[in-house]
Image (cartoon, rainbow, N blue to C red):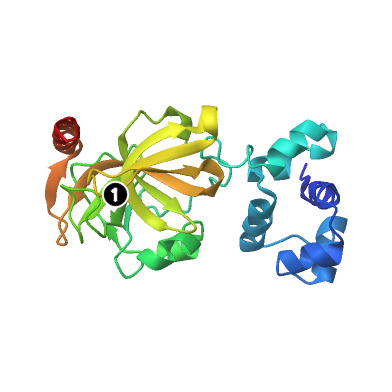
């Protein structure tokens, strides 16, 4: 059973919003919102994502669970964002492309497409328009994507390089200082060393290998996607450095940074 209509009304009343006010917040007409709540109309994919994000609730729960049975405490946890992205799965209808053999393809987010990725990452049409690349060094048993890197915060990966990364579903299992591409609505595509503090603080820590950039944390409910680093490539997509190689390099950099701190 689809509980979207029931849950939409429950969440609106929990937040003490009128239909007119909520419709304004969601950029909908009041009549459209009323039709959603009455079950006489259903939102398209884009509207569904916007509504779920607004209420900080996972799509799976929004559609499949009657949340009118939840306690006040449980509803409060949803409002605070604990339901959303706690394991990186709340909107994980991952838009992807496949070849004629139904095998996952590796899409390339170009530098030109970088600015729009945070808005188009869940749009199958947007993803289908991205170019694809074949990499013999990458197994097709996992989902991979190629992302452009800008700036000087993550040496030895330089400005203008491309990072091949593996899609991560469960963010709580990320080991400390794992190189990852992180997608957020505010910052778009960033490449950092990631430590998951989701279970203790509901956030992830982002650290640069360049000591000039200070570490910072992001609440998990502000993160859209996380992709684990596998290798990086030149502009011509020739392999430069493997996951093992960069792990060694990053370890040496952290050691150098630690020694410099001890001398100062």
Total marks placed: 1
Residue 134: horizontal and vertical position, in percent?
23, 52
Q: Residues within 10 Å of mark 1 (few under 14, many from 20)?
A: few
Q: Nearer the viewer, residue 101 or 146?
A: 146
From this view, report whether residue 248 is shown above or below residue 154: above
Residue 223: horizontal and vertical position, in percent?
49, 47
From this view, report whether residue 50 is shown above or below residue 215: below
Q: Which image quarter: residue 69?
A: top right
Residue 47: horizontal and vertical position, in percent?
66, 62
From this view, report whether residue 109 is shown above or below residue 199: below
Q: Quadrant of the C terminus?
A: top left
Q: Is residue 203 left or right of residue 15?
A: left
From this view, report whether residue 161 is shown above or below residue 217: below
Please say whether residue 147 is visible from this viewpoint: yes
Q: Is residue 239 left or right of residue 216?
A: left
Q: Nearer the viewer, residue 177 or 260?
A: 260
The residue singled out by tag 1 in the image is 213
Please say whether residue 129 is visible from this viewpoint: no
Q: Residue at x 55, y 41 (%)?
A: 85
Q: Nearer the viewer, residue 140 or 119?
A: 119
Residue 189: horizontal and vertical position, in percent?
37, 56
Q: Which image quarter: residue 159?
A: bottom left
Q: Residue at x 16, y 61 (%)?
A: 235
Q: Residue at x 46, y 57 (%)?
A: 121
Q: Residue at x 82, y 34 (%)?
A: 72
Of helix, strand and loop, which one carries label 1?
loop
Q: Is residue 90 left or right of residue 179?
A: right
Q: Quadrant of the N terminus?
A: top right
């Amino acid at each position: 059973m689809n509980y979207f209509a029931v849950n939409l009304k429950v969440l609106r009343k929990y937040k003490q919003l009128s239909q007119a006010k909520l419709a304004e917040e969601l950029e909908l007409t009041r009549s459209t919102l009323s039709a959603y709540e009455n079950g006489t109309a259903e939102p398209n994919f884009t509207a569904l994502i916007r509504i779920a994000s607004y209420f900080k609730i996972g799509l799976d729960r929004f559609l499949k669970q009657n949340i009118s049975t939840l306690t006040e405490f449980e509803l409060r946890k949803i409002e605070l964002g604990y339901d959303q992205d706690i394991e990186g799965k709340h909107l994980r209808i991952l838009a992807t492309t496949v070849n004629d053999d139904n095998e996952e393809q590796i899409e390339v987010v170009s530098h030109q497409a970088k600015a729009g990725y945070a808005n188009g990452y869940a749009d199958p049409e947007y993803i289908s328009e991205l170019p694809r690349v074949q990499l013999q060094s990458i197994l097709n048993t996992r989902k991979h994507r190629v992302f452009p890197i800008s700036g000087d915060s993550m040496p030895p990966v330089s400005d203008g390089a491309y990072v091949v990364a593996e899609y991560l579903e469960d963010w709580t299992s990320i080991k400390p200082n794992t190189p990852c591409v992180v997608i957020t609505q505010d910052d778009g595509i960033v490449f950092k060393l990631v430590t998951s503090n989701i279970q203790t603080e509901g956030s992830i820590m982002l650290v640069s290998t360049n000591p000039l950039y200070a570490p910072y944390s992001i609440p998990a409910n502000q993160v859209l996607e996380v992709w684990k680093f596998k290798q990086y490539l030149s502009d011509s997509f020739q392999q430069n450095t493997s996951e093992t190689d960069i792990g060694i390099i990053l370890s040496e950099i952290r050691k150098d940074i630690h020694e410099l701190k001890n001398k100062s």
